């Protein structure tokens, strides 16, 4: 999808350099994917200790599929 965005040149240069990609589009896509991945991991970590999972792995293992 084509989009026009105003990104500071230095920031874009850094993204291209750090991702190792040759094109700006691929570098931005890679940076955005990594950002989303990191946010999702942070979200999972924030749930640590808040989920109450029953310790019935034995039942789950032997359930009919």
Image (cartoon, helix red, strand yellow):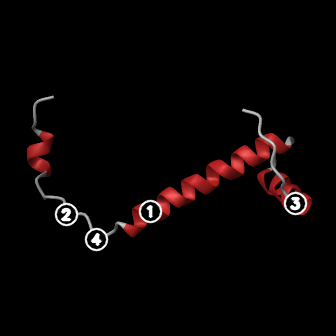
SS at badge 2: loop
Residue contact between numbered discs 3 and 1, judged by CB atoms under 8 Å:
no
Residue contact between numbered discs 3 and 2, judged by CB atoms under 8 Å:
no
| Foreground pick, 17 / 47 | 47
- The answer to whether 1 appears left or right of 64 in the picture is right
The image quarter containing residue 12 is bottom right
Mark toward the start of the polypeptide (1 vs 4):
1
- Tell which tag, 1 or 4, sits nearer the viewer: 1
SS at badge 4: loop
| Residue for badge 4 | 49
- The answer to whether 37 appears left or right of 28 in the picture is left
Mark toward the start of the polypeptide (4 vs 3):
3
Q: Residue 45: x and y, percent?
A: 41, 66
SS at badge 3: loop
Mark toward the start of the polypeptide (3 vs 1):
3
Q: How far apart are marks 3 and 1 (CA)?
A: 29 Å
Q: Residue 23: x and y, percent?
A: 86, 41
| Residue for badge 3 | 8
Mark toward the start of the polypeptide (3 vs 2):
3
Q: Distance between the residues labelled 4 and 2?
A: 8 Å
Bin the neighbour count of mark 4 within 10 Å (Cα to Cα): few under 14, some 14-19, many 20 and up. Answer: few
Number of numbered discs visible in the structure rendering: 4
For the point 84% across and 53% down, the residue is 6
Q: In this view, does 2 lie above or below 30?
A: above
The residue furthest right is 9
Dot label at residue 43:
1
Bin the neighbour count of mark 2 within 10 Å (Cα to Cα): few under 14, some 14-19, many 20 and up. Answer: few
- The answer to whether 1 appears left or right of 21 in the picture is left
For the point 13% across and 43% down, the residue is 60
SS at badge 1: helix
For the point 78% across and 46% down, the residue is 27
């Amino acid at each position: 999808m084509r989009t026009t965005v105003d990104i500071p040149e230095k920031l874009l240069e850094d993204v291209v350099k750090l991702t190792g990609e040759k094109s700006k589009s691929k570098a931005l896509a890679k940076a955005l994917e990594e950002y989303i991945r990191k946010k999702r991991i942070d979200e999972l970590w924030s749930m640590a200790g808040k989920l109450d999972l029953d310790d019935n792995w034995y039942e789950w293992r032997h359930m009919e599929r």
